Image: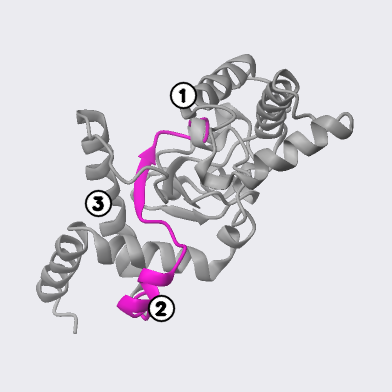
Amino acid sequence: MLLRASIKSLQDSDNLKVWAFASPPVLDVDNARACSSFVTTVVNNCDVVTRSNISPFAVTVSLMRAVNKRLEEQGLNMSDFQSTIAYLKKIREGVDGEMLMSADEVISELDNAIEREDEEDPDHLYVPGKVVLMYDLWEKEQRKDQKEEESEKDFINFVKEMLPRLKDTNLHSNSVEDLKLSTSAKEAILCMDGTCKALQFIELDGRLIDDHMSPQYRSSIARILSSRNVAKEVTESIKEEDQKNNVI
């Protein structure tokens, strides 16, 4: 942003394109949005670094309080011997037991917590520009509406721009079997900016640190391209451009 402000020729968005991978939130909301014409931040799954700020922490704490309240209501808050035994029995039920909170209740609590946060608060920072969020679906069946399809088209255009710059890397070195065993992301969506809900809370998942590492980012990009129809479209598009430019 400083370079663009000081060098006039870079103020043309075609002359300066920035892809930020795993960026921490470093800008207030106005500046984060202002650079969306030339900056795209790529976020892998539940990468905690991209969410390391006051607002996501406050939202997550709010959700944890709601969970704690539900534990108290059901006598599972480990405040005495009896409730501790009841809590341990509940844990032993595993995935066969009844959920403490339904998915709809969790989403409702998150929405309410996010709504209470003021995105204009100067202490709240965001990742820069538009955001490509790569993620692994909790629910494998997903209904697609028109908005999602438009986001997918935007993501295809993003990949077309980015992939030629990665030709010399080992992005596609993962074998098919490696990708099947990987915990990398499987889907991607383009968000308008870092205020999107997915970045407004810390996902308490065992991968929240691993998802920040470079190998996981490369693996997620490779997996998404290998598992979607866009992979063939992007590859053919690049080949056509190379042939036009006589590039081997």
The answer to which image quadrant residue 117 occupies is: top right
| In magenta segment, residue 76 | no
Q: Residue 156 carries which label?
A: 3
Q: In this view, does 48 lie to the left or right of 97?
A: right
Quarter of the figure with the C terminus: bottom left
Residue plotted at (72% across, 32% down): 54
Task: Name the residue type under label 1.
Answer: Asp
Which comes sooner in the sequence, label 2 or label 1?
Answer: 1
Secondary-structure class at tag 1: helix
Q: Name the residue under label 2.
A: 169
Residue occupying the far right of the picture: 80
Secondary-structure class at tag 2: loop
Which is closer to the viewer, label 1 or label 3?
Answer: 1
Numbered marks: total: 3
Which comes sooner in the sequence, label 3 or label 2?
Answer: 3
Q: Position of residue 71 (x, y in %)?
A: 71, 26
